[in-house]
Amino acid sequence: MTDHFGKLTSKDFASDQDIRWCPGCGDYSVLANVQRVMPELGIPRENFVFVSGIGCSSRFPYYMNTYGFHTIHGRAPAFATGIKASRPDLSVWVVTGDGDGLSIGGNHLLHTIRRNIDIQILLFNNRVYGLTKGQYSPTSPIGMRTQSTPDGSIDHPIDPLAFALGAGATFVARTIDVDGPHLQQMLRRAHSHPGTALIEILQNCPVYNDNEWIEVEDRKSRINAALVLEDGEPLLFGSEDQRRGIRLHDGIPTVVELQKGEDPIAAGVAVHNERTQTPAYAFALASLKRPEFPLPIGVFRAVETATYDALLQGQVADAIVKRGAGSLYDLLHSGDTWTVGPS
Amino acid sequence: MNAMSGKVPAKAVRQIEGVAIRFTGDSGDGMQLTGTKFTEATALAGNELATLPDYPAEIRAPAGTLAGVSGFQIHFSSKSVRTPADHPDVLVAFNPAALRANIDDVRPGGMVIVNSNSFTDKSLKRAGYAEDPRPSLRDRYAMVEIPLTRLNREVLKDLDISMRDADRCKNFFALGLMYWLYHRPMEPTERWLENRFKGDLLEANLRVLRAGHAFGETTELLPVSYIVPKAKIQPGVYRNVTGNTALAWGIVAAGALMQKDVFLGAYPITPASDVLHEVARHRHFGVKTFQAEDEISAISAAIGASFAGVLSVTTTSGPGFVLKQEALGLAVMAELPLVVIDIQRAGPSTGMPTKIEQADLLLALYGRNSDSPMPVIAPLSPGDCFYTVLEAFEWAVKYMTPVVVLSNGHLANSSEPWRIPDIETLSRPRITHWTDAKTFQPYARNPETLARPWAIPGTPGLEHRIGGLAKEQTTGNVSYDPENNEQMIRLRAEKVARIAVDIPPIEIDGPESGELLVVGWGGTFGAITSAVEAARVDGKPVSSIQLRHLNPFPTNLEQILRRFDKILVPELNQGQLVRLLRSEFLVPAIGMNKVRGQPFLIEELRARIDELLSEETSP
Ligand code: SF4
């Protein structure tokens, strides 16, 4: 095994445990790509911590040869908060799913994002409960038939990124399980972002919800079905001979057909700016849904503001500067005391 | 003290052993502050004392109603004091509602001081009095009727403050009067006022305080003042401390003594929030506090911090403790050090949040799915809360386990003079984290304590995964092996059981064997010990023990139980410890149970003790 001063490889991040996901599960690809990116981040392996809740995706930490904590359903962001708040030197990654993160754990996800603690959250969205054998999830579409919804789901789905943006997320991105290069790029971006970075990973569950994202997973149809966000570039999609763009008028998106060679900016196509201060812009992108619109992938929003862990650490440091390191004697003798002498 | 009715020479001074006073008024009248200041002065006067604040659950209940009555009782003496006393000798009532809510508790013949200006038709009606109760009370109590509002306004009439602000000072008039009545020093309160107020408000409060004192000297309403001589107290430096402050300082002290950063995760809940508030003031000890979005997050973050290698703790009360159980189960499985402080309150459900109960014992022991054993400690007094937290942290890191501390709302808010410990005498456990990669196994056990190693992120070569799934012995890998699972469950139970070697043998108060043993636990210590000692003074053959360690029990507990014919177990619940003692030791322990949101009265314990002793012992 390579020591932590030498160059690590993806193998160094693979644990010795047998992987227990179903054959063909999208999680395999995500795991392989995470293991590939880790060695590039310039962080000693022992400083990585992977934290998860309950669900198929939450098995993830067992397969990473880093520190890992497989916790309880929905609470991984809270565990990660305690880890990062007490040890800001660690690189903390949460792995969760649409059920774990948005149903039972919705409250923790909301508050973790709002505090902007410096962790990465990988939310695997397969729009179904896998581990409990196929019930509909908070991201499942209306009408989805499952064992618990034989007549079709009547729950309105939630969009993970719209949820995160509503909570004040400073970084949100979306990527696809099988698109290695893009997934890796998003992981690097999330890691370099100071604050909570949430990546929605569109993930296929071949057993309970096969081909949910096939339009964007399939290389051929992706050209028309996905809109790849590039900072500073116009919102364009479609093949060379059938280019289209997204126009935003009063925050309302419409699709513009472009003539061959037509200047998209002149045609009113919006230019992507990750640093747009108002979340309304990223929210408008998050509202783009198939089949009316292409599904955006990439970084929706990346703005910088103070992180919870740094502020907390700062308060402790300030208190020590102002008051000196705490003295137990002074604490116990503070306020009114009196002495009882020997009688 | 005795009846006030007899003719006494003007301004006589009489010496008494002790007295219990209850200050009562509207929640806006500043009764807690009045009581606290009187307590400080009393501590400085060298008496033993115990206090009990009693405030309404509503933050601002309608003024003048029974729901809005707030009270503060202090019992002080030249002899030993262990409880705030069953019945106050003196009641100070700022309005008719306060009088009505408290008069039945006053010792017959006791003194009742009222604000005569408050007996208007309107406030009588608000209090639910059909007619002025004073005439009928004059036969039964020494009524002292003082026009408090008027006197107070007169003192302040030339100051440029509003009538409202002026009226808000009148508690200090009463306080000054009580200082005169019991010869308490005024300086600490004056010093406090000087630090707290400026300008006209400072002037107003100081004036009123001194005017109250001067009024005592001159008024004919109070012909006698009282001296309570100093108590014989163990030499040392003392301060007043409430249970919640002692818990908070225990948390801070644990970090300082073990040379570790501390992480406290908490969610606001009555009556535990003050612990969070107090700890948050001491960041310069390297203490981080995290106000979480809910109880579950609070404990989850604390467990995360423990995994990351800091001392971690979460504080809560009953309903919050319930919410934490799932995460607590994970802490048992992951075998991580954690202290959980539950300040029990009256339930079930939301119950009576500001009232007293000790009914979470079985929850602490058995509140999780499957067999999930956990050590439990319960402090005996406000000051003991400090040591309990230190002990809990010591166990948590030594045995790699969560530890529960069961305080209660009574200990939380009561204060007592506390002898400040000599810091050099406090134990300073050394924490070592595993570092050797060659020999590391996440679930290898220390042969003596059965603790697994505390290996923390950032240590090269010890990368490992833990979680809630069943663990293989030694490696900690996920395992569904039936044999392994049973062994792991037994090992965890054995680990907790072995903590017994660290528990000192429990001491009996009274004869070592005999007819009746009273067994209490936690915060009922004061009432039980007072009742048992009083019974012995009357020649009754009765002893008592008060359990601080509820899991595991002290090793000599069984032998002690077997040396007595009868065992009485008073608890502020429907019979939890008694159930444990009966099932664990097959002894015929008898329960005595109270769930009224109030502490035990000494007299009711006495009555039950006398009753049991007069019964024929069954063959
Ligand atoms: S159930 Fe679906 S999500 Fe879970 S492991 Fe199997 S394929 Fe993957």
Image (cartoon, coloured by chain):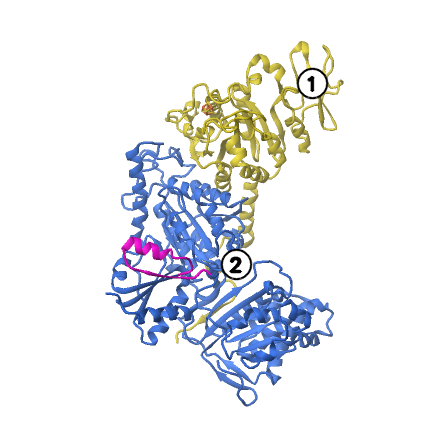
Chain colours: A yellow, B blue
Q: Is residue B254 above or below residue A332?
A: above
- SS for callout 1: strand
> What amino acid type is highlighted by mark number 2?
Thr
Q: Which residue is mark 2?
A: B354
> Depth check: B4 or A197 in front?
B4
The quadrant holding residue A341 is bottom left
Range of magenta residues: B571-595
The answer to whether residue A258 is left or right of residue B353 is: right
Q: Chain of mark 1?
A: A
> Depth check: B557 or A222 in front?
B557
The residue at the point 58 percent across, 12 percent down is A220
Q: Which residue is mark 1?
A: A245
> What amino acid type is highlighted by mark number 1?
Gly
The answer to whether residue A109 is left or right of residue B617 is: right
> Depth check: B182 or B433 in front?
B182
Q: Chain of mark 2?
A: B
